[in-house]
């Protein structure tokens, strides 16, 4: 692989696909997809009675709690118990009364400790995705340990629910989590926050469908230092997020709104009212698709299946150099510099890769840039007549009809070439795409009169344009 920058900073870029969300009972596609996750973690959190080293410290009413090594933290434990005992049922009723579907992120060990709640989830057809074996932080786990926990989570999940989970979300993930998810056959994985739409991610084993999740429109912000203080703030935040995406959907750019919930947090009465108001708000709007993550993943797989394409950032070095070594005339070392600098998925488009090549060219020394200019053959020059051009140059010159000149035109080119090289010390270079021989001659006659600094800058810009056209010819638009 050549990729030395392993992140995707482009995604869908300027033009995200129109997801054409289903719209049961409506006409035309839905304007927004809303997806509610109820995290079921209570009973799977850190606790010494669960074999952990310390008590839980994350996402509770005790903001900024410290873990208690080796001790039971009875307040913390009972805060979590509230989620299982009371908060869950409040949420369950709220969604069930409105017939709204939900995806549960179920921690396998927590599900095992809550058979009544699991039965209720299944009674109402909630999707139960896997939220790992235990609700712990995987950042420091070895890949082998994390893989073993994933295996055990899946085995326990199936034993408890009778079904394999279709989706995976670790939460406090590691750098290996998505690679490990891709080793299995999930419909989707959700340990990512990078977009408003599902997307395919390349991994070592196979492409993985990501349904990105959210840590902002999420009740966890009630339990973090900079978070929601009141239900009103939560409601306003969710409503703004919904309205923003709904407006985008009205313009044909529909998106997906994730909302993350926790039984022990929003299940508290002082917060639950805000959620109820939000559910009623979206219920008052037409063309809203509320779906489980599994439904969304099935829709995406059907309408936007993975499509392999040439990805320069994932090519072996020698293949990359064979494909792109000729982008700058006789100067493959610039393609090497592009690789050494590091390219990622943002450079897998013609525009992105051209930008990386332009950076390499602009950062080359002046002597190197001059050498690139001098590496170009004259237009309609001796080399062209003798058939000694590179494939790229030959195609470019032929596309402008320079291989079909009349004797007078050839004489004119020969005179201008001599004058130009005498004046500037490099050949006249012009990106010929869209130009015929007459337009090229006109440009030639004008530019030969330029002052040297202006002409050097112009020639360099033309070389960058030629590079872009050569890359586009390989990758397509
Ligand atoms: N413009 C596009 N290709 C070429 C080339 O090979 N030589 C010169 N001089 N200009 C070009």
Image (cartoon, rainbow, N blue to C red):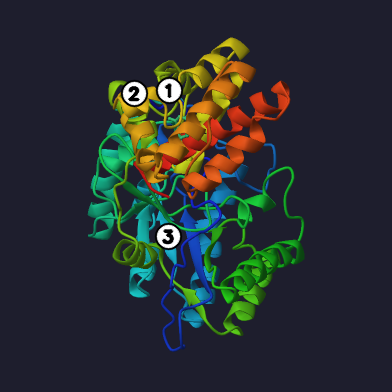
Residue 53 placed where, x, y %? 48, 26
Quadrant hosting residue 219: bottom right
Q: Residue at x 25, y 37 (%)?
A: 205
Q: Is residue 206 depicted above or below 33 in this figure?
A: above
Asked if disc 3 and disc 1 are in contact, CB closer than 8 Å, the reply is no
Q: On residue 335, which mark appears?
A: 1
| SS for callout 1 | helix
How far is the residue under mark 3 from the one under mark 1? Answer: 48 Å
- Residue drawn at 53 percent across, 37 percent down: 465
Answer whether labels 2 and 1 touch (C-beta < 8 Å). yes
Q: Position of residue 354 (x, y in %)?
A: 50, 35
Between discs 3 and 1, the one toward the N terminus: 3
Sooner in the amino-acid sequence: mark 2 or mark 3: 3
**Which disc, if any, is residue 104?**
3
Who's the residue at 64% across and 62% down the image?
268
Q: Which residue is mark 2?
A: 321
Q: Nearer the viewer, residue 200 or 373?
A: 373
What residue occupies the far front of the structure in this picture?
A: 408
Report which quarter residue 247 is drawn in: bottom right
């Amino acid at each position: 692989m050549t990729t030395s920058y392993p992140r995707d900073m482009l995604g869908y870029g300027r033009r995200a696909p129109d997801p054409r969300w289903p719209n049961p009972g409506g006409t035309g596609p839905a304007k927004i997809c809303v997806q509610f996750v109820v995290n079921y973690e209570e009973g799977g959190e850190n606790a010494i009675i669960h074999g952990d080293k310390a008590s839980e410290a994350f996402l509770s009413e005790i903001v900024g709690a410290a873990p208690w090594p080796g001790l039971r933290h009875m307040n913390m434990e009972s805060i979590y118990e509230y989620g299982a005992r009371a908060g869950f049922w409040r949420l369950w009723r709220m969604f069930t009364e409105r017939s709204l579907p939900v995806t549960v992120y179920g921690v396998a060990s927590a599900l095992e400790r809550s058979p009544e709640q699991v039965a209720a989830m299944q009674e109402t057809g909630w999707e139960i995705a896997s939220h790992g074996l235990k609700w712990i932080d995987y950042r420091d786990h070895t890949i082998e340990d994390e893989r073993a926990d994933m295996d055990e989570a899946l085995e326990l999940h199936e034993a408890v629910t009778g079904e394999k989970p279709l989706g995976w979300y670790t939460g406090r993930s590691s750098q290996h989590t998505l690679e490990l998810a891709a080793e299995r056959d999930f419909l989707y994985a959700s340990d990512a926050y990078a977009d408003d739409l599902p997307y395919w991610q390349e991994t070592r084993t196979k492409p993985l469908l990501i349904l990105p999740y959210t840590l902002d429109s999420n009740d966890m912000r009630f339990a973090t230092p900079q978070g929601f203080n009141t239900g009103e703030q939560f409601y306003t935040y969710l409503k703004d997020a919904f309205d923003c995406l709904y407006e985008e959907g009205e313009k044909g750019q529909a998106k997906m709104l994730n909302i993350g919930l926790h039984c022990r947090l929003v299940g508290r009465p002082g917060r639950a009212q805000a959620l109820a108001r939000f559910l009623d708000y979206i219920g008052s709007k037409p063309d809203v698709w509320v779906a489980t993550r599994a439904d969304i993943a099935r829709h995406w797989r059907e309408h936007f299946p993975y499509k392999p394409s040439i990805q320069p950032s994932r090519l072996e070095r020698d293949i990359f150099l064979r494909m792109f070594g000729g982008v700058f005339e006789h100067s493959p070392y610039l393609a090497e510099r592009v690789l050494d600098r590091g390219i990622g998925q943002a450079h897998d488009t013609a525009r992105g890769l051209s930008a990386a090549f332009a950076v390499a060219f602009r950062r080359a020394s002046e002597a190197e840039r001059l050498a690139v200019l001098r590496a170009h053959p004259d237009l309609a020059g001796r080399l062209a007549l003798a058939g000694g051009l590179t494939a790229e140059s030959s195609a470019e010159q032929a596309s402008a009809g320079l291989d079909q000149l009349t004797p007078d035109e050839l004489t004119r080119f020969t005179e201008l070439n001599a004058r130009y090289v005498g004046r500037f010390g490099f050949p006249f270079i012009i990106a010929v795409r869209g130009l015929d021989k007459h337009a090229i001659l006109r440009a030639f006659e004008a530019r030969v009169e330029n002052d040297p600094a202006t002409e050097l800058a112009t020639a360099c810009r033309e070389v960058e344009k030629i590079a872009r056209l050569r890359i586009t010819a390989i990758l397509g638009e």
